[in-house]
Amino acid sequence: MKALVWHGKGDVRIDTVPDPKLENPTDVIVKITAMAICGSDLHLLDGYQPTMKKGDILGHEPMGIVVEVGKGVKKLKKGDRVVVPFVIACGECFFCTRGFYAACDRSNPNKEMADKMMGHSPAGLFGFSHLVGGYAGGQAEYLRVPYADVGPQKIESDLPDEKVLFLSDIFPTGWMAAERAEIEMGDTVAVWGGGPVGQMAIQSAWLQGAGRVICIERVPERLEMARTYGRAEVINFDEEHVYERLQEMTSGIGPDRCIDAVGCEAHSHGSVDAVLDKVKKTIKLGTDRAHVLREAIYNCRKAGTISVPGVYVGLVDKVPFGAAMNKGLSIRMGQTHVQKYTAKLLGMIEAGQIDPAGIITHTRPLEEAPELYKTFRDKKDGCVKVVLQP
């Protein structure tokens, strides 16, 4: 089959690789009909995520048709149309039974490696390094899906792929980000980042009762999408000082809830902390660029909440922890418990409450993925969200 394969930092290619096979009775094989490029895929392209190996297949936002079914699978059959969550979860461990699917204790075969790096291992993830299992990803013609009775969301309506594909990751991620921000009716919510997760967080904030949503970005197409599709007020951080502008917009109080939808590759307009982050990353004295997290801490109102769906991969320094403590902030974060939300969010799509397809700017063949990774990373050609088709 054809698949997008990682060959090193900045080097992804379409290769011919062996088709996946059933390995366990609870597996299914899915023939992919659509997949997306996620912002966190760029962390792999840019070399931020450790434990990548040459030959790894990328991608964690896939959907398709079930073509093979393991003997132990009870809920799916050949021919079913499914969206596959990026999180792999057993459904039976201490964490899964409590709805914490991204903390599954059984799905990461490299658990010991992750334990040493993080204290405890997260769940296995598709196409996202050997630290979280080394699973082949879904930017390919076929995908093996473990624990198939727990992960895939069956699509029984005739909604096109584009409307339901993002149940694999960014819609549940944006929803959980808003949920963890603890939004109360009428709250002012500030969202850093107008990329795919940021756009879904904006939509989710409105659906969860926000009275006002503000997006902080600098890319014109993302700002415009946040303003039109997202109905948000916008701040271009290349043109305005974020703290001063948010103070002005909130009468000196600050936003009630702040969402960092950027993560470890944050940019800023010449701030000292961002410059230091970039220098330390270049000379290998640091990993993550955490400007947005710091800015959210300074800007959030006292006794407010910061939610972090943006991916961080290593060590973060210069965090104003004293400010967070003295302001009484709550900070909540984590990989998304996708399986907890998919059925509910599918119902919202079917009811017309939200159309996630509104963020798609590019639909292209899988063969164009290497170039589109760079287009997406470099924010060229108005690229906000890419959907690939085999």
Image: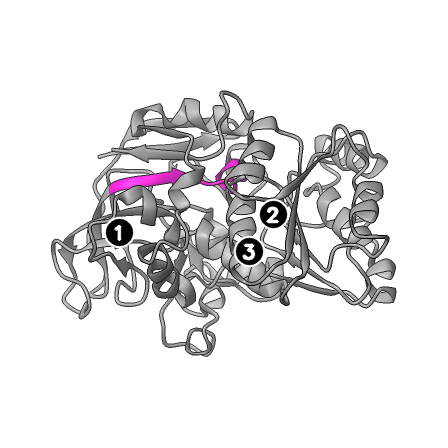
- Which quadrant holds the N terminus? top left
Determine if residue 59 is in view: no
Asked if residue 41 is among those painted magenta in the image, a careful observer would answer yes
Mark 1 and mark 2: Cα distance apart in space: 29 Å
Among numbered discs 1 and 2, the one appearing first in the sequence: 1
Residue type at mark 2 is: Ala
Mark 2 and mark 3: Cα distance apart in space: 16 Å
The label nearer to you, 3 versus 1, is 3
Q: Residue at x 20, y 58 (%)?
A: 156
Q: Which residues are magenta?
A: 33-43
- Mark 1 = which residue? 144
Q: Nearer the viewer, residue 12 or 306?
A: 306
Residue type at mark 1 is: Arg
The disc placed on residue 261 is: 2
Of helix, strand and loop, which one carries label 2?
loop
Q: Is residue 38 left or right of residue 165?
A: right
Q: Residue at x 77, y 65 (%)?
A: 329
Q: Are marks 1 and 2 in contact (CB under 8 Å)?
A: no
